[in-house]
Image (cartoon, rainbow, N blue to C red):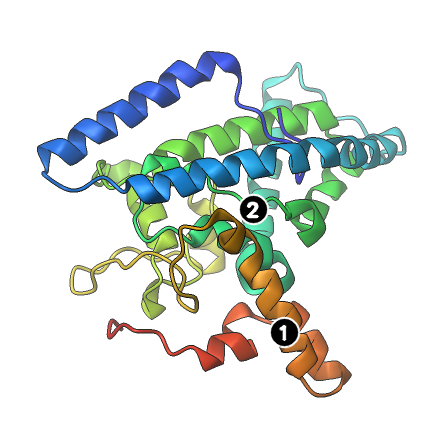
Amino acid sequence: MAIPGGASVIPLEFYPVVAAAVAAELAWYAHRRRPYPWAETATSLAIFLIRVPAKLASAGILGAVAWFIWMHRAATLPLDRWWGLALLFAAVEFCYYWAHRLGHEVRWVWASHSVHHSPTSLHLASAFRLGATETLSGGWLVYLPLYFLGFNPVAVAAMLALNLFYQFWLHTEAVGTLGPLEWVLNTPAHHRVHHASNPCYLDRNYGGVVIVWDRLFGTFAAARPEVPLTYGLAHATPSVNPVVVCSREWVAMGRDVIRARGLRGRLGQLFGRPGDSLSARALIPQRDSP
């Protein structure tokens, strides 16, 4: 299961599904005569291994915080009623949207989330590339009100685990658009836009299972035929070194804090928008797309 910001574990019965999906994607690459990104896959798997002990170590702390708030909750939401489960799904999805959005709009949180956006191609193995410092970044704080409102921490963890597992299949170019489902669900087409680093696609499509919150809050974008998707980080050079990928935004942020002038300038480097950082402004993107 998963405590927000803590360890994330895919149930063992899901691993055959993951393996079969990766095999199908490999066959798709072969059929299209496209080279499979083996180096990036190896980097993603290495980062996954780096992440596991860090997340396991933090799970106990975050679990204790969750249970403390739960013990002082204002109400108890029944999970043996359909409407209780529906509220749980909507609440977790809502919090995921905002946690994800903060991961793009606040540099301190982006320092961890940028790891996920570092691949220069989008394939299923990209889903395993998640930062090992998410506990430090604090995106998990968004979920804390759920426990006070009466959502059991174990139920929240289970729903978030299902949410994250759903997103596994979104990381591929092998699936096209899905017709009317595109209006409600987060789909591979929507998530490809999310991973694109073209200026017109940046910071869009934050949803987990559904795309509803993006449509409501104005962060939705669809792919434009005249602007081919370009993956990778907009303000960093690609790397297949897992240590570099996991640490470079933290290093850059520390360097920028030292270079910044005044308290306001330093706080801006820590908690401002990533694209406004000194490092981002110093690196001119090598692309001409709108």
* Count of residue discs: 2
Establish if 165 lies above or below 104: above
Three-letter code for the amino acid on which mark 1 is drawn = Arg
Looking at the image, residue 80 lies above or below residue 133: above
- Between the residue at mark 1 and the residue at mark 2, the CA separation in whole angstroms equals 20 Å
Rendered image quadrant of residue 123? top left
Vertical position of residue 270 compared to residue 213: above or below: below
Q: Quadrant of residue 118?
A: bottom left
Using the rendered view, name the quadrant where residue 124 is placed. top left
Give the crowd class for mark 2: few <14, some 14-19, many >=20 residues within 10 Å. Answer: many
Q: Which residue is mark 1?
A: 255
Pinpoint residue 131: horizontal percent, then vertical percent.
56, 46
Q: Residue at x 49, y 53 (%)?
A: 245
Q: Quadrant of the C terminus?
A: bottom left
- The residue indicated by pointer 2 is 131
Give the answer, above or below, for where 23 lies relative to 7: above
Q: Residues within 10 Å of mark 1 (few under 14, many from 20)?
A: some
User: Which amino acid type corresponds to the residue marked 2 in the rendered image?
Assistant: Gly
Q: Are marks 1 and 2 in contact (CB under 8 Å)?
A: no
User: Which of the two labelled residues, at mark 1 and mark 2, occupies the earlier sequence position?
Assistant: 2
